[in-house]
Amino acid sequence: DAKTTQPPSMDCAEGRAANLPCNHSTISGNEYVYWYRQIHSQGPQYIIHGLKNNETNEMASLIITEDRKSSTLILPHATLRDTAVYYCIVRAGGGSNYKLTFGKGTLLTVNP
Amino acid sequence: DSGVTQTPKHLITATGQRVTLRCSPRSGDLSVYWYQQSLDQGLQFLIQYYNGEERAKGNILERFSAQQFPDLHSELNLSSLELGDSALYFCASSPPGPSSGNTIYFGEGSWLTVV
């Protein structure tokens, strides 16, 4: 699986958009970009994933650059409950081997 | 609630002992994954089962073993426990199918403390 690079920490004001960047310059054609978050000691929570196109769901938007070498997770209106470690993961597909390899992620702190 | 159930939520045991952690995957999911998260190591993949068969192995110690039963629940057995095995153990599951976009859902974890 391709490696990802994320800033170790970011701050965001409550009510503002949080934009979390991720570099995955060695991503290959069949690898998806996944975002998970982990609120202190809880189970990692799935947020969103995509292959090429931008994606949006009720939690967030995922913007993937045209060359797929980087992506941005956008939380449109951050709340205090969004304070968590956010993990960007790229995962090879095919078959039944779907494991996720977690890096260190970005600690997002939402401030009042 | 992800639909993945793990028991027990908390467990305290002594060094040298053996424990079993249990996981019930989401309804319909055939894959089960086990992860370990300790303070200094982050989330480490241990092992994956798919429909009862081992499919991928990560950094799982020889003292640890797992299995997936016909009803698809899984157990992680940890033996000869050491202080360093104290960690959060997460189970996750994902649905079947060839799609590479299948999402993995995590349970809330089992806290193991070895004293």
Image (cartoon, coloured by chain):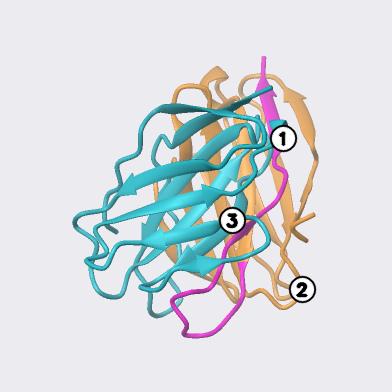
* Residue B44 seen in the current view: no
The residues tagged by marks 3 and 2 sit, at their Cα atoms, a distance apart of 26 Å
* Residue A70 seen in the current view: yes
Say which residue label 1 marks: A81
Which kind of residue does numbered mark 3 sit on?
Ala
Which kind of residue does numbered mark 2 sit on?
Ser
Say which residue label 3 marks: A60
Chain in orange, by letter, is B
Disc number lying in front (1 or 2): 1
> What secondary structure is marked by label 1?
helix
Q: Are marks 1 and 3 on the same chain?
A: yes
Among the two numbered marks 1 and 3 on one chain, the one whose residue lies closer to the N terminus: 3
The residues tagged by marks 1 and 3 sit, at their Cα atoms, a distance apart of 14 Å
Which kind of residue does numbered mark 1 sit on?
Arg
Within 10 Å of disc 2 (Cα), the crowding (few <14, some 14-19, many 20+) is: few
Quarter of the figure with the C terminus of chain B: top right
Is residue B109 covered in magenta? yes
**Label 1 lies in what chain?**
A
Q: What residue is drawn where x is 36% and y is 32%?
A: A7
User: Is A27 on the left or on the right of B84, as rendered?
Assistant: left
Q: Are marks 1 and 3 in contact (CB under 8 Å)?
A: no
Q: Is residue A19 above or below residue A51?
A: above
Q: What residue is drawn where x is 67% and y is 54%?
A: B75
Say which residue label 2 marks: B27
Residue A43 found in image quarter: top right
Q: Is B104 or A48 nearer to us in this picture?
A: A48
Q: Magenta: predominant secondary structure element?
A: loop
